[in-house]
Every structure is written in C-alpha cells, then in structure tokens.
Image (cartoon, rainbow, N blue to C red):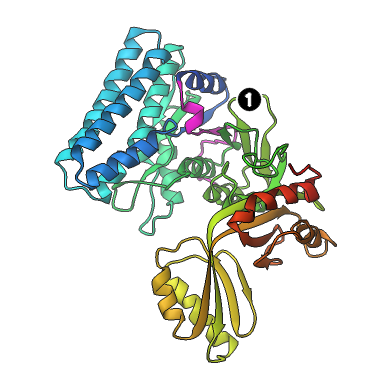
Amino acid sequence: MNNNSTSFSDLVVMKFGGTSVGSAERIRNVGDLISGSERKVVVLSAMSGVTNMLVEISQLFNNSNTQGALNKIQELQEKYQVVIEELYSQSEHKEEALTFVAEKMNFLRSFKEEYFTDFEERQILAQGEIISVEMMRLHLAERGIVAIKLPALEYMVTNKHGEPNLPEIQSQLIELLSHYPKQSLFITEGYICRNAYLEIDNLKRGGSDYTAALIGAALDAKEIQIWTDIDGLHNNDPRVVDHTTAVRHLHFNEAAELAYFGAKILHPACIHPAKMRNIPVRLLNSMEPEAKGTIISNRIKEGSLKAVAAKDGITALRILSSRMLLAQGFMRKVFETFERYQTAVDMITTSEVAITLTIDNTNRLEEILLELRKIADVSVDEDMTIISVVGDMNWKNVGFESRVVEALSELPVRMISYGGSNYGVSILIRSEDKVRALKLLSKHLFHEEVS
C-alpha cells in the first residue's frame, strides 16, 4: 500500500497496444474509450509497425548504412503524416502534431553523426511511445478533453539489475499526480524507462503491459485493463485453431503460465505486480469494447481446464552422467553451468543419473555443451515446441493429466512435466507437430472439431 494520504483505489489503468493506436480511426476509438469521467491512467504503445521500423533504423546506423537509415526515417515520417492528416480536423492541432513528429524525426537523423552503441539505440526505440502520447493528447484537446501527460522517463525507473524499482516508481508517480488533484485523465508512455544510471532504457518487448501493471501496483489501483484487438485470452491459438472461445475467468497463476508459455495477448511480467497487490487484470478488445473479455484475479474455478498455449523455439538437452556421480553432485554441476551462462531452463525431468531439460535461449549453447560434456553425455534436439495446458491441475483431480496425454496419442511426445505446478501440465513435441497438437487438444479438452 502507498503511504500517501491520497487514495487511488478508484483509479483504473488502461493500456492500449500498437494495433489499438495503429491508425487515425483507431486512435479516435481509443479517444472514445478513455473520455469518460472515471479517473484513469492511460498507457500507450507505439503505433503498430513503428517499433520494428525504429529497430531497423538502429541496425542501419549500427552498420554504418547512414543513407539507408535516413531513407527509413523519411518513410517513418511519411507514415505519421498520413495518420495526422486524417486524424485532426483543426489546422492548429494538425500543425502542432506535424511539428512534433518532425522534431522527433530530426532527432533520429542526428544519430548519423554519432558513434553508435546500445545507448543510442535505446534513445531511438523510445520515440514511438513518446509520439503516440503527444498525438493522443492533441487528439483529445481537439475534442475539448484535457489529458495530463505523465512522462514515463520521469517516474519509470529500474535498478542496477534491470528490474523495476517499485518504491521509487511509486514515490515519483504520486509526486507527479499530486500536482493535478482535480484532473481525472492522465496519459503516459508504455515500454520506456530510465535505468539505474538515469539513461533512457526500456522494459523490453511487450513492456507496455508491464508498465501498466507497475503503475497499477504503485497506485493500488482499482483495476488494470489491457486493451488489444481480440476478445480476451482464448482457450487456444485462434491463428491456427478454429472456433476458439474467450476464457472469462483466470487465476493469476493460470494467466502467468499461459503468458510464459506462449499466449501472445499478455506479457508474462505483468502478472506479478498485479498479483502482489491483488489488483484484477481485465483483457479487453478495443475493436469490440462491449465484449466481456477475460478477467484475471485470485479467484480459482476448481475442476476445470481453461486453455492451451504453445511456445516455439525450444531446444531440449538430454544429459546423462558419464561418471555415475551421486545425484546431488551431478545435478548441482549441471544447473550451475546454466546459471553461469545466464540461460534459463523451462522444463525439467530427472532420474538419478540423467536430466532432460529445455531452453529457449541458445546464445551460449556451445559454451554450455563444452562444459557439460566434461561430466556427461549430452544429446540435443532442436526445433521443439512446449505445449502447456492450464487449469486446475491439482493432482487430486482424477483423470485430468490422462485426458491431455490421450489427446496427443497420435503424436510422438519427447517430454512431459506434470506436478511442478498446480495450474498446468507441459508437453514437449516437435515444432512440426504443433498445429496438429493444438487442434487435437481443442477437440479432446474443449469438444471442438479438428479440421
């Protein structure tokens, strides 16, 4: 709880992703959604496609392709100009928006004179969110609505480990808000922050969700809303499975498992701050605001399977002790190796002298293998996918795990992890079998037909 006398228990945090602000029409739609009298902080992402363009500009500068970078900056400026021409009807606001964008594009062009490093790249990547917030402020002003900008670079800070400094975020946010006691609408940038050295930095891809959750936690808000272009979190991947349906209620732990194991609608990091402060998270559709969406809370619906998610790009390692080391010595050496090379492990199955585990980051794989092969025989399987089935997976629920295994009886299964969590069971399969597996799980678990 915050120690400030001002209460924010009636405040709602609303986050809108890139597709929700990706055109003039959609910016207007967001304006409609946030223009009510309820007190709120609105978190905005860069327009869809902009962050990718900024990444490309950074890469071109980094590769000393200055002309290529300048051409891409011009393309980006023209993209904004098209939206601005359609969005604003009053010349005053149109000119102000065009001038603001031009200043930011000139800022990008200034990097042609720079020795280019990660520091410069992070400054470039921040501009998409900064432009989104100013364009929204001007759009609301044109409608006669006052929106106060809360610059993320003035309150969103991380510590020396790159983790959000929640006490500092809370202190700075409350200080900023205290200057506007009678205002009800605030807008801010998602994704961007300052690090422990006060340099411009970011919360990585999907970080706008994280921004919203951190603001909600810092202010003990009433609710955190994540607005996207789909009606809540679906029970399977709607891109490859027909007739999926939105899951109306999820426990925080169920949502965390789905987010970590591939559900694209929600960033994994955003669950923890909300769960810590017991703030409900609602997933809503900015294209269909009347849809119920999904609510995530501490409530658990017992005896039900909720959803399936898939995580690609997985590599499996089977590590068999070559010296018959005692289990504790063998396992310690194995996991110390992964820790030393800062490589996280997703799934694990063990016996006394063998471990099979999965990783999704292979940047240090060759070094890891070099060390492991001093104590073990190691085999590697690449192009694998983890399928996670989430719900009330308490071991006392008879038959739940067998339903999952039976659904995949037509496919080769490399690995199963069950019992590590009361909220999910994970299965490792070949990536080439993913679509078939997702369809079979829908048929067997949710009674949906396989096409």
**Residue 299 x/y as whole percent:** 73, 47
Label 1 sits on residue: 289
Which residue extends farthest top? Answer: 90
Range shown magenta: 1-23
Residue 261 showing in the rendered view = no
**Residue 15 x/y as whole percent:** 52, 34
Q: Does residue 324 sit above or below 408 in this rendering? A: below
Q: Does residue 77 sit above or below 331 in this rendering? A: above
Among the 4 quarters of the image, the one containing residue 151: top left
Q: Amino acid at mark 1?
A: Pro
Tell me which secondary structure the magenta stretch mostly adopts.
loop
Relative depth, front residue between 408 and 308: 408
Q: Is residue 214 left or right of residue 355?
A: left
**Residue at left 63%, top 62%?**
428
**Residue at left 38%, top 37%?**
51
For label 1, the SS is loop
**Residue 93 x/y as whole percent:** 35, 13
Residue 295 showing in the rendered view = yes
**Residue 451 x/y as whole percent:** 73, 41
Q: Does residue 93 sit above or below 303 in this rendering? A: above
Q: Does residue 60 sit above or below 390 in this rendering? A: above
Relative depth, front residue between 74 and 137: 74
**Residue at left 50%, top 30%?**
19
